[in-house]
Amino acid sequence: MGLFSSRKKEALITQIPADVIGSVSAPARVAVPDAVIDTELSRQAEEAVVVEREEHAFAVESAAAPAPEPEAALTAAPAPEPEDPDLYGPIGADGKLRTYRDKLPVTRVAGQTKVVCVLNQKGGVGKSTTAINLSAVLGDMGRQVLLVDLDPQGNSTSGLGIPKRLIQKSTYDVLLNNKDGDPRYLEQVIIPDVVKGVDVVPATLDLASAELELVMEFSRESRLKNALGAYLGRYDYMIIDCPPSLGLLTVNALVAADKILTPIQCEFYALEGLTKLLETKDRVKKTINPRLDMLGIVMTMYSRTNLADQVVEEVRKHFGNLVFDTVIPRNVKISEAPSFGLPVTQHAPNSKGAQAYVALAKEVIARG
């Protein structure tokens, strides 16, 4: 009879493959020989045993294997913490101006310092505005910047919210009161982290008398260069805001600088005096500072008028690639920002003026 009873055989007959049973009709299936049925049942029993062994082996392996690491949660990265506004600003928690000892740690190497003087002997062309906002944007881009206010009007100082009544030492002291030639004297004057990445050497009206006092001083044209020398390598950029003249203060800036950035207003008198400025630059380059060169010319206070377009076209025709592609527009937000003691990029970051200075900073970096 075989391994299974006849009852089991009848129950499993319908599971026999068609190629074994053939094309017999349903009544004829009962007549299938017992030997064929026994053979098929034996094959199925052997397959069942194999499957049982494989399942047992898999269970043993799973028990021995370490538990898989849980999948990382598919959640968005947390937003970066906003920077503490108290980290920056000219005044510390004690109500006094910050000192160089309060400077935040610098987490990157500055590399070779580029010294740029912002210069045009014509006033009202946006020198201080350009010095402030270019410095601020470079600081936002991760650069370390030292902004030196060499203009007795002190617009770069007040434009960044530094109260002049609290200033104990200024650029006047840097030029005239470092009697011992201390190379670290500048640390007594620097106000650190006025805005992100920007330290300031402030100016007061005392600087107005420096022109006369320097006349009788030894190495009078190199005073600023000597003061900045010990800090080369600590900053990526030193930006010098020059007075609207070609006197000894400006000569000090030209001797200390590597490059000249000249703002030109988009108006009829824009080119007046520029020839004289370039002559002074060439004279300083030949006699005192051979590395001095032009960084570029930036058009400022641009408005959509035929006159402004003609001035821009004329300047580009004369100076070619020396003129930056970026044109700074006449923008009310740029004019408002100094009254808040802020660069325009913080006062109104989405304004056309702020965007223009961001573009200018990128060009300055690209030009090296």
Image (cartoon, rainbow, N blue to C red):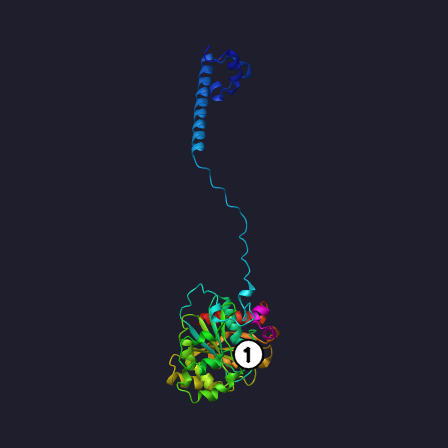
Q: Residue 147's spot in the image, x, y percent?
A: 49, 74
- Identify the image quadrant of the C terminus: bottom left
> Residue at image x 45%, y 19%?
45
Any magenta on residue 96? no
Numbered marks: total: 1
Q: Residue 278's spot in the image, x, y percent?
A: 45, 84
Outermost residue, top direction?
1
Q: Which residues are magenta?
A: 336-348
Residue 59 vs residue 200, the one in the foreground: 200
Q: Which quadrant of the structure image shows residue 216? A: bottom left
Residue 121 appearing in the image: no
Residue 256 vs residue 269, the one in the foreground: 256
Label 1 element class: helix
Q: Relative to residue 195, is residue 56 depicted above or below?
A: above
Magenta-colored segment: predominant secondary structure: helix
Q: Residue 208's spot in the image, x, y percent?
A: 51, 85
Q: Say what amino acid the circle numbered 1 marks.
A: Asn
Q: Residue 306's spot in the image, x, y percent?
A: 59, 80
* Disc 1: CA contacts within 10 A as few (<14), some (14-19) or many (>=20): many
Residue that mark 1 sits on: 155
Residue 43 appearing in the image: yes
Outermost residue, front direction?
94
> Residue at image x 51%, y 76%?
131
Q: Relative to residue 6, is residue 273 depicted above or below?
A: below
Any magenta on residue 341? yes
